[in-house]
Amino acid sequence: MKRFSIVALTGRSGSGKSFAADYLKQLGVQVIDGDDVARQVVRKGSKCLKELVKAFSEDILNDNGTLNRKKLADICFADKAKKRKLDKITHPYIIERMVVLFDDLKSEGHRYCVVEAGAVVESGLYTVCDKMIMITADEDRQIERIVERDNITEQQARARLAAQLDADEVEGLCDVVIANDGTIEEFKVKIENLAKKLNEWFEKQG
């Protein structure tokens, strides 16, 4: 059976990695949304959610028993120790679910997939990835995008970035770094070139 390869697509919040992932999908690349997987593992009644409630109290729940992600984020992104606790609980469940998705794609005959995830290094996912791609952006642009996307204050946006690894700590592990500081059309061209590179790496291998 041909080898199945895993590519991490990462970047700090507001860098544009989700846009890159969506555009790669349009170009025919198999993409796993790490945030979607994270939502799956904390569904109402899940083991992961029960552990989170035990760690952070029922205050993180909505009235219907589902996770209030915004409230949990406000708690954890303002306190690095709590963020580490959150990661320690959720990451094993996320990795476990991703392995199932990898196996499904492999059984369907795909040669590789791209995993869009912010915490590739923190979760340990990078250790099983064949290649790593990082999207970067100027911090002011990141703040602007986060505020607009999540409807939060600039202070909250800065707290979220402060809770993440510095770009320099991740870049050294990456095979490709793509700057997203220009126009959308310029960024699209860079992602199109990335799709070609992925094809060269994996689809043409023996």
Image (tube, rainbow, N blue to C red):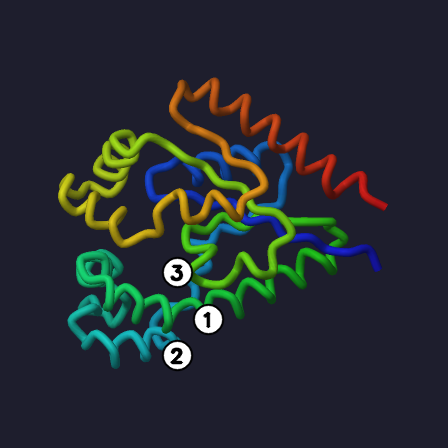
Few, some or many residues within 10 Å of mark 1 (<14, 14–19, 20+): some
Q: Mark 2 points at which residue?
A: 47
Question: Who is closer to the viewer here, 10 or 108?
Answer: 10
Residue 96 placed where, x, y %? 53, 70
* 2 and 1 marks in contact (CB < 8 Å): yes
Looking at the image, tell me whether mark 2 or mark 1 is earlier in sequence order: 2
User: Which quadrant: the N terminus?
Assistant: bottom right
Q: Mark 3 points at which residue?
A: 39
Question: Who is closer to the viewer here, 105 or 137?
Answer: 137
Q: Name the residue under label 1.
A: 93
Residue type, mark 3 in image = Arg
Corner quadrant of residue 75:
bottom left
Residue 32 placed where, x, y %? 54, 51
Looking at the image, tell me whether mark 3 or mark 1 is earlier in sequence order: 3
Residue type, mark 1 in image = Tyr
**Label 1 element class:** helix
